Amino acid sequence: MKVNNVNGISDNICRCGSWLEHWKKFSKQELSRCCSNEDCGGRPVLGAHVQKNSLTDASWYIVPLCNRCHGKKGESLTLDGTALVSANVSITCGV
């Protein structure tokens, strides 16, 4: 699945302690040893905000990325099958 790395979202917060913890809590998947970007082998250390490359879904989602891929703000990434977790805290950790 293609997603876009969203710019300037790091100020948003959730009750999970970090966006990576948010992803772990709501994804129902184990954290992989590799970054969610299928073109990368780095270790995922951050929960990154992304949007699907879609004209019909403008929602923000969280995926685990390494530092290098997290820094690719505004770029398109191809995910390796990692679950997208909603970044909308009103339907996740803010409930």
Image (cartoon, grey):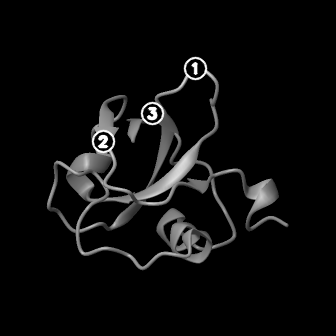
Percent x, y of residue 49: 49, 46
37 left or right of 83 in image: left
Which label lies toward us, 2 or 3?
Answer: 2
Measure how far apart labels 2 and 1 are at the Cα level: 17 Å
Amino acid type, mark 3: Asn
Which label lies toward us, 1 or 3?
Answer: 1
- The local secondary structure at tag 3 comes to loop
Residue at which label 1 appears: 55
Residue at which label 3 appears: 7
Q: Earlier in the sequence, mark 1 or mark 3?
A: 3
Check if mark 2's residue and mark 3's residue have beta carbons within 8 Å.
no
Amino acid type, mark 1: Leu
Residue at which label 2 appears: 78
Q: Residues within 10 Å of mark 1 (few under 14, many from 20)?
A: few
**Residue drawn 30% across and 42% down?**
78
Q: Earlier in the sequence, mark 2 or mark 3?
A: 3
- The local secondary structure at tag 2 comes to strand
**Residue drawn 23% across and 51% down?**
38
- The local secondary structure at tag 1 comes to loop
Query: In which quadrant is the N terminus drawn?
Result: top left
88 shown above or below 1: below
